[in-house]
Image (spheres, coloured by chain):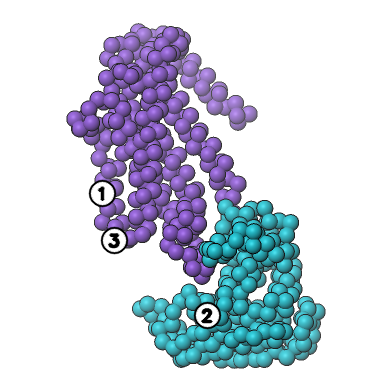
Chain colours: A cyan, B purple
Amino acid sequence: MAEGVAFDGVAFDGVRFGWRGEAPLFDELSLRVPAGEIVAVVGASGCGKSTLLRLAAGLLTPDAGRVTAPAGERAFVFQRPTLLPWRTLADNVRLPLELAGGADARDADDAVREALGKVGLADDADKLPRALSGGMKMRASLARALVTRPTLMLLDEPFGALDALSRRALHAVFLALWRREGFTALLVTHDIDEAVLLSDRVLVMSSRGEGVPATLSGDVTVTLPRPRTRALLHDPALGAIARGLEEML
Amino acid sequence: MSRLLPLAAAALLLLAWWGLSLKYPPVLLPSPLEVLTEGWSGRAKLLEATWNTALSSAGGLLIAGAFGMSGGILFLRSRWLEAALYPYALLVQTVPIVAIAPLLVVWLGYGAPVAVTTAAIVAFFPILTAANVGLRGVSEEQVELLTLYGASWWQQLIKLRLPASLPYLFSGLRTAVGLSVIGAIIGEFVGSNGAPPTLGYLVLQSSRSAQTGTTFAAIFFATALALAAFGAVRLAESRLIDPWHGDSQ
């Protein structure tokens, strides 16, 4: 757990959720994400991982049960950078502050500059998204998530669309940010190695077929030491955890 | 080479026109030189008429823009309203403007208001359609992003949907701007009494009085007006949209 963190985590208690007119996607789903931890969720496509994140974000409401999140701001990082193409990077990062209102313009400028600096884009503030590579856009997306100083970060396969080199760089950026900011993170990913490298725990979500609610069929604590680097990917301990997870899938 | 082809085609057309004009009397087909002479000698009146027609087209386009955008926003706000009113919007598009114009003279009397109204009627539908599609042309993630940060419906409209709709709107405007010139000229056919002069009036009067050279000159001025209006829209589009449009995320 990151240092100096003292807030509640994410809790799903007996959650039921289904799209209108369809069988429930989750029924009696319960899970805990302790404050300050990174918890990864892996599972087959379509089993409901992204829906789980949207429930945690408050974008969806459960049909039954309760979802609680840490007090404070929530941030969401989508699979695509989801930058508004007509806004410069600085204006994209400023968007959450604009919508919240009440922030002094100079304070907002400082917060934007700081957030861009944290992801290594301080010199690109005035560029339009179109001028950036995929990796840089995803960094900007992280900066926008950071600008409100969130207590909960929800990440929906944020590195999935990047090339191997950019993904490696973004892993390092994400881990450094987490160490510094101490937010709680729920990360959905298809990449088991990535899940093990980044997280404290990995939850395996599986569905036994159409119409049958998804369940958490595995909950594996990652005992690898922190701080973690890409070098760990060659560590036999990581390989053993990843193999165990693959068998659960 | 490919740039020269349109010029070569124009030269061939002019040559064919000149050749044909030798076979027919000027009242049926004046030669290019006769049209040029008529246009030059009547340039003051033609320019004044072009200006007046331009004002009616621009007025009609503005009204069409205001109603088209408002309609698009209303339809976005309420699917019920869209279901109730869209068929009538389509009706406005299908009723022949030539048939409506005399009725407008009865209601509005002679003068620019008839031309402004006919221009507005023909330009309305492309703008409404563009607004209707453009305001919905945002990704689910973009909407979720703004929802997550507590954006109101109006904030979503102003910060996301309106800017995102601009490429669609300009596409609709490119169609509407040419139609507005045609609509104004049709309105002038029946609603203009020559004081002040308008292109529609000049075309009608000169053809009735067998001044075919003036008719041709007025047609060329009308074409130049439509091209200039199209060029102005394209210029605005290139300034406002091109720098960011087409960004693949």
For disc 3, the marked residue is B80
For disc 1, the marked residue is B88
Q: Tell me where residue B53 appears, x and y as whole percent.
A: 37, 26
**Chain on which label 2 sits:** A
- 2 vs 1, front mark: 2
Which three-letter amino acid code belongs to the residue tagged 1? Tyr
Identify whether B55 is placed above or below A73: above
Q: In which quarter of the image is the N terminus of chain B?
A: top right
Establish whether labels 3 and 2 are both on one chain.
Answer: no
Report how far apart the C-alphas of labels 3 and 2 lie in the structure: 32 Å
Report how far apart the C-alphas of labels 2 and 1 lie in the structure: 44 Å
Which three-letter amino acid code belongs to the residue tagged 3? Trp
**Chain on which label 3 sits:** B
Q: In which quarter of the image is the C terminus of chain B?
A: bottom right
Left or right of B219: which side holds A35? right
The answer to which of B22 and A125 lies nearer the viewer is A125
Which three-letter amino acid code belongs to the residue tagged 2? Ala
Mark 1 is surrounded, within 10 Å at the Cα level, by few (under 14), some (14 to 19) or many (20 or more) other residues, namely few
The disc at residue B162 is none
| Sequence-earlier tag: 3 or 1 | 3
Identify whether B29 is placed above or below A197: above
Which of the 4 quarters of the picture holds residue B191?
A: top left
For disc 2, the marked residue is A56
Identify whether B241 is placed above or below B248: above
Q: Tell me where residue A76 appears, x and y as whole percent.
A: 57, 72
Establish whether labels 2 and 1 are both on one chain.
Answer: no
